Structures are given as C-alpha cells and as structure tokens.
Image (cartoon, rainbow, N blue to C red):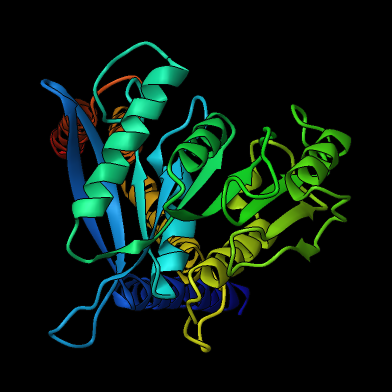
Amino acid sequence: MKQRQQQYGRCTQRLLLAIALLWGLICLQIASSHAVQVQSIAVEVSPNQVLTGQLYTPRSKTKVKAAVPSVLFCHGLSSHKDTFAPLAWELAARGIAGVVFDFGGYGQSYDRPISPAANFIDAEAMLNWMKQAPLIDHNALGIVGHSMGGTTALEMAQAHPELKSTVLLGIAGYATPRSPANLMFGSGVYEEFNPVGQMQEIAASAAGQDLPPNRTLGRFTDGTARRLVLSPSIDHALAPYDKLLQEAAIAWLSQSFDHSPSPDRSLGFARPKAMVLAVAGAAGLFAELYGWMLRQLKSPRQQLVLRSAIALSLCGLLLSSLPSQFSPFSLQNAVGAGITLIGLPIFLVGSV
C-alpha cells in the first residue's frame, strides 16, 4: 500500500510538472506573439564602427502600418541593451516603439575605451537612424537613460530640443525649468550614488521650485512638465527593472506624446512569468528523468559519465544563452553550442 501511494504521488508530481511546462510554453508563445515585434538593427557610427541594437514596435493588425512615437534607451555602466528590454517591450505593447542598443565597448557593438564623449556620439548616431526609420513618428521622439546612460540622455535631450520627453533613472544632472522638455527623474530610496536629498535638490532646480516626490509640476503641452518619482524598495542597479518606475515612465512618455495606450494592457510581465513557469516545469521533469537514468545505470563509471555529460551540456547551454560584454555573442554562442554537442556524445558513448 505504501509503495503504491509513493508511486501515485510520484505520478501526480510528474503530471503537475508536465502541466506547468506545457502551460508555461503556451503562455510564453502567446505573450511573445502578442502586440510586439522585435527587429535587430545595426547602425554605423564610422567605418568599421557599428552599433548593434533592437527595435521594438507594436505589431500591427492591419497591412497599413502607421508611424508611432519612439523612445531611445541608453544603458548604464557595465551593462548592455537588454537592461531596457522589459520596458521597451511594455512600451511597444502600448503603441510606443523603443530602440535599445549597446554603446561602443559594450555588448555586441564595436570595441572602444569607455568615453562619455563617445557615448554621446553613439547616441546621436542612433537618434539619426530613428529619424530616418519609416515606422517611427519623427515628431514624437523621447529618450530614457539609466546611470551612465542617464548622463548621456540628459545631454542628448538638451542638445536636441525636438525630443519631447526625457526619463532619467538613478541619475542626477543639471536641468532648467524649460530644458529639456518634459523631464522625469526616477530613483529609489536606497540609491547609493545620488541620494534622495540630492535628487530632490536637482528636481527642484529643474522645476524652478520645490518638487514634492510623485507629483507633476508644469505642463506637457509646452514642455515644462517635471516629476520626481521615488520607489520605496530599490537601489541604483535595480532602477530599470522596478515596476513602479516602469509604470511611471510609461505614463510619462504617453502623456508627453499625447498618446493613449490600450486600456486593456497592464504591466503584467507575462513573458517573465511564463518563462519562470516553463523553466520550473522543465527543471522538475529533468530532475525526474535524471534520477530515473541514474537508477538504470548500475556502474559507477556510467553514473560518473552521465553526471559529467549533463554538467557539460548545461554549461554549454548557459554560455550560449547569456550575452556578454566581453566577447562577441556569435563566438560565445558557438563555444556554448560546441560544449553542449560534446557533452551529449559523451553521455551516449559512456552509457552503453
């Protein structure tokens, strides 16, 4: 009886894991195909100096695609374009395109030393590309930056008055009540480099008067809107991922562009949730399979080969799936795939 109960419990566990995997994959497919289209882009700064990025656009339900507002995202130090991928996705789902890119010396872009001046040149190259892109409304452009990228974003907004909205996360900088247009500061109460007091002083200078947190002063119509948003639970590094700051940025950009997002869209993070569900189901089923295979292999040598092969394969898959700012992704991807392909034959040969 006890053995039968154990078998029943194990079967139930496997069934639940399979359901989690299947449901996660279904939700991931729905979330990935709904409302957003992602396109890889390459922008040449100068000969042999190419910036890599991605364009997030709303998926049109009609054959005729209208130009939409667009936002340029500038990542921070020791980071890359994927930092702003969640926010760019959420904006695109609401009808605002987003362009994320790697600065030179980061991610997949051309190699160079870290340089604020070169960051500005890179950002200008991306903005010029956006002004020529056919699906982007050239009269509704904005910019978002975090940390180092926030400094670049502020300089860009001050140098390009055609930018209708600026969002700075985890960064303080000098601004006036009229430049740049429609400026929002976003920070956390645990911000290390720009403490709350300093952020409040900078925001007050930009507004021309005291600016209480989470309150808007000025008008969007003439570009004088100013706001300081403080999140109660984050530090400097987490600012781009904070739900409160993301919601505030989406609302700010939408108001700046006089754009009405779809009312049925909420910041639900459907893709990350679906991915977690699918990975949890897959990991559970893999653990069940791994345990069953170990029980079938009586020889210690065969069990060692199995463990080694799986370790190699998992390391290869991890290496091939994570982008790196220290090496080209194509090389990293090839190395990871190679390790994976080496691990699988080792298992097949060793387990015979």
Q: Please state, as top left, top right, bottom left or bottom right, where the N terminus lies in the image.
A: bottom right
Nearest to the observer: residue 111 or residue 352: 111
Identity of the residue drawn at 44% across and 75% down = 94
Residue at 37%, 45% in the rendered image? 294
Q: If the image is split into quadrants, where does the C terminus sit?
A: top left
Residue 276 vs residue 185, the one in the foreground: 185
Image quadrant in which you'd find residue 108: top left
**Up-down relation of residue 42 to residue 262 (above or below):** above
**59 to the left or right of 254:** left
Q: Residue at x 33, y 36 (%)?
A: 124
Residue 166 in the image: x percent, y percent?
55, 51
Indicate the position of residue 306 as horizontal and vertical percent values. Answer: 30, 36
Residue 231 screen position, x and y as percent: 77, 53
| Number of numbered markers | 0
Does any portion of residue 325 appear in the rendered image?
no
Is 199 above or below relative to 55?
Answer: above
Q: Is residue 36 visible?
A: yes
Identified at 40% across, 68% down, the residue is 96
In this view, 112 is above or below 347: above
In the displayed structure, 267 sits above or below 175; it is below
Residue 316 location (% of width, % of height)? 28, 33
Residue toward you, 302 or 137 = 137
